[in-house]
Amino acid sequence: MVINLILIISSILISLIGIFFLYFNKENLGTTLNIILNGIIYVFLGILFFIFFFLSMDNYFTPNIALTLWHISFIFWLISLSILSTIHKFTINFEKQPVFSTFFYALIIGLIIGLSFTPYSFNIRSNFGLYIITIENSLLLFLLLCYNLITIGRMLYNTIKYFTRIRNKTSKKMLIILTSEFNLIIIIYSLYFLFQNVIINYIYASFYLIGAFIVSYYLIRKPFLFIELTNKIYDFIIFHRSGILLYSYNFETGEVTDESLLKGSILIGINHILSNFINRKDQLGLIKMQNRDIILEYNNQYGYALLLTTNHKNAFINKAVNNFMQKFTALNKQKLQSLNGLIDISEFRNAEDIILKYFEPFLLKD
């Protein structure tokens, strides 16, 4: 009982810390959906599943109560695994879930939960003062193991598929660590039903707490690592209202460039927009292309604009752009007001320090 309570309290504390920093760092974590799903997984897997699962092991309760507690934990496990798989996919590459994938998960979860309520699906026995609960329904056990293996396969598939497109080595390292940890937890949970040994439960608890601690650590120290890992920024350009290039930074090479990589009709069109600044409500803020978004942000008072190209914009990029504009304006307002005739663009090289501060997740790293 004491060991189980220590494990439960530890998991609850780690989960609450993780939820707090999810909220505290919400503006650095990309989409609202990603934040909500991470919060749900902390509650479902780290708190509710852990409480019901380890309380059901203790013979302080009657067998019927213990079996009910375990059954509840079983349902939370199924739902949590589906959410965990979705979070893993969204963290790598945010896109809509295929209809077939959603339908398949809903179908198999429904079948497993339905079978779990059939008579004599589970058996409970006491061993050294602890309850051991086994699955007696062969079809239920088969579907559960298949569901667990499919989830592992899906995470490995997405990791391999998008690995070369991930922004930098730090993000790749984090993804490998967490994917391995999640898969190991699922494997250990499955082994319990095959070998019916209570020690496996404590091994599972140990690895889960390690994984939860790692996730919470990254949330505290490097929350931006949870932003869609394959989303990249390509060009970062600052124009004067006259169309003159003041500053250009290429995120793919990590170098300041003298001219934008944008060529041809796109650049001509952008120059036309910038040379005709009008009221903010009439200005174009986003140009959507097939594989990229072109973000345009204006400052009419000081006569310049920022252009950024990315796979697609998100909340983090929007915030970073706004912060950049405020800081850049504060540092260069006198220079911008006095621009006329010959312009020395080297005076605006301080933009690089601002980029390093606000766009850290997208910088080229070894």
Image (spheres, grey):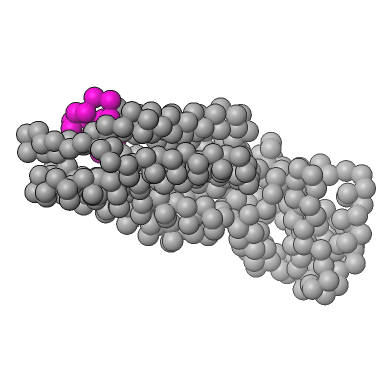
- Out of 343 and 319, give the one closest to the viewer: 319
Could you tell me if residue 177 is visible in this image? no
In the image, residue 18 sits, relative to residue 167, either above or below, namely below
Query: Measured from the top left, where is residue 153 in percent x and y?
Result: 49, 28
- Out of 316 and 135, give the one closest to the viewer: 135
Q: Say if the magenta span includes residue 351.
A: no
- Out of 359 and 149, give the one closest to the viewer: 149
Query: Measured from the top left, where is residue 305 in percent x and y?
Result: 78, 61
Quadrant for residue 16, please give it.
bottom left
- Out of 203 and 106, give the one closest to the viewer: 106
* In this rendering, position of residue 146 left or right of residue 47: right
Q: Please tell me which residue is depicted at 64% across the width and 63% down the height of the picture.
A: 322
Query: Measured from the top left, where is residue 342 in percent x and y?
Result: 88, 58
Q: Please tell me which residue is depicted at 23% across the width and 33% down the height of the picture.
A: 134
Which secondary structure is most common in the magenta stretch?
helix
Q: Quadrant of the C terminus?
A: top right
Q: Say if the magenta span includes residue 194.
A: yes
Q: Please tell me which residue is depicted at 40% across the width and 39% down the height of the picture.
A: 112
State which region is magenta.
192-207
In the image, residue 344 sits, relative to residue 280, either above or below, namely above
Q: Residue furthest front?
A: 119
* In this rendering, position of residue 16 left or right of residue 245: left
* In this rendering, position of residue 215 left or right of residue 160: left
